[in-house]
Image (tube, rainbow, N blue to C red):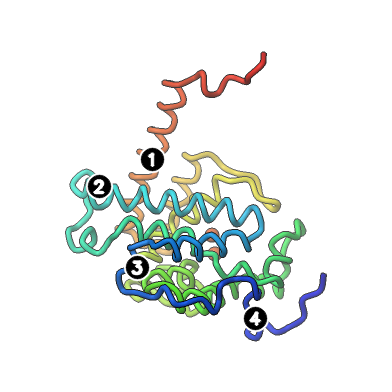
């Protein structure tokens, strides 16, 4: 299928609840049935890989938020940072960070297993500002800014606006690390997954350039604890993994 309209003029698919009463509220951590429906409609519009990825980043966002706020001493989270975090908002930010990928012309590029050319890359990168365009009507600005800023780099070399350091909102700096971690540890049409340990190493390498160094130290420790916990629960409940009927 051909999608020829210019990026900025693409309309949101008509069956998303674009004209539904707004969910916008400063208390965006209160997930109402209507906001749950909105999140679900966005995820259902995405291709299968992006939907799975968004759900996983949402889950990890929540877990990281819980640990940062309930175990600040363990992870050396300064009070000023812990006080700004709501785990449910981080979950919603993770679930919605790739909202811009619901646009058909972007979806088409993502689902194509061929490596992306320069022009294709530009089209896919537009998911950031297009995501913001949708989200700003439904969720609080901190979450909408996750949609636009999760590909900004700490040193200013990212996109769409080349923001750097603290210009990048806190939730976007956190979700960026979780987003990269999940992308690295998952198989994609264009790359094979790497191990948890390799991903932590790669993320560590981007400390200071791609990622906020202080947030990197905190989030990597938490991701490692979550991973260890998952590994030990597999060992503790081996019967879950047994194939049935054999
Ligand atoms: Fe993205
Ligand atoms: Fe992502």
Left or right: residue 177 versus residue 103 is: left
Which residue is at 53% across, 56% downward? 54
The numbered disc on residue 224 is 1
| Comes first in the chain, label 4 or label 3 | 4
Tag 3 and tag 2, C-beta contact below 8 Å: no
Which residue is at 35% across, 57% downward? 88
Above or below, 24 relative to 237: below
| Comes first in the chain, label 1 or label 3 | 3
Closest to the observer, 109 or 138:
138
Secondary-structure class at tag 1:
helix
Residue to which mark 4 is pinned: 11
| Comes first in the chain, label 2 or label 4 | 4
Q: Report, in whole angstroms, how far the alpha carbon at label 1 lies from the one at label 4.
A: 40 Å
Residue to which mark 2 is pinned: 75
| Comes first in the chain, label 1 or label 4 | 4
Q: Residues within 10 Å of mark 1 (few under 14, many from 20)?
A: some
Tag 4 and tag 3, C-beta contact below 8 Å: no
Mark 1 or 3, closer to the camera: 3
Residue 2: horizontal and vertical position, in percent? 81, 74
């Amino acid at each position: 299928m051909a999608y020829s309209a210019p990026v900025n003029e693409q309309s949101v698919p008509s069956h998303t609840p674009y004209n539904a009463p707004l969910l916008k509220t400063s208390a965006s951590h209160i997930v109402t049935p209507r906001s749950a429906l909105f999140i679900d409609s966005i995820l259902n519009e995405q291709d299968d890989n992006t939907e799975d990825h968004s759900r996983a980043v949402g889950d990890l966002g929540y877990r990281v938020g819980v640990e940062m706020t309930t175990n600040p001493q363990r992870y050396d989270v300064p009070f000023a940072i812990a006080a700004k975090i709501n785990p449910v908002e981080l979950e919603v930010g993770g679930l919605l960070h790739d909202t811009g990928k619901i646009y058909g012309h972007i979806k088409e590029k993502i689902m194509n297993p061929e490596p992306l050319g320069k022009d294709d890359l530009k089209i896919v990168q537009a998911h950031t500002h297009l995501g913001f365009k949708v989200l700003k009507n439904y969720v609080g600005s901190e979450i909408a800014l996750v949609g636009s800023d999760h590909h900004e780099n700490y040193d200013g070399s990212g996109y769409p606006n080349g923001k750097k350091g603290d210009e990048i909102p806190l939730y976007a700096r956190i979700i960026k690390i979780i987003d990269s971690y999940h992308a690295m540890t998952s198989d994609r049409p264009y790359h094979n997954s790497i191990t948890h340990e390799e991903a932590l190493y790669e993320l560590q390498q981007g400390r200071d350039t791609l990622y906020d160094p202080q947030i990197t130290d905190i989030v990597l420790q938490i991701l490692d604890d979550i991973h260890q916990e998952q590994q030990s629960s597999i060992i503790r409940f081996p019967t879950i993994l047994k194939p049935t009927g054999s």
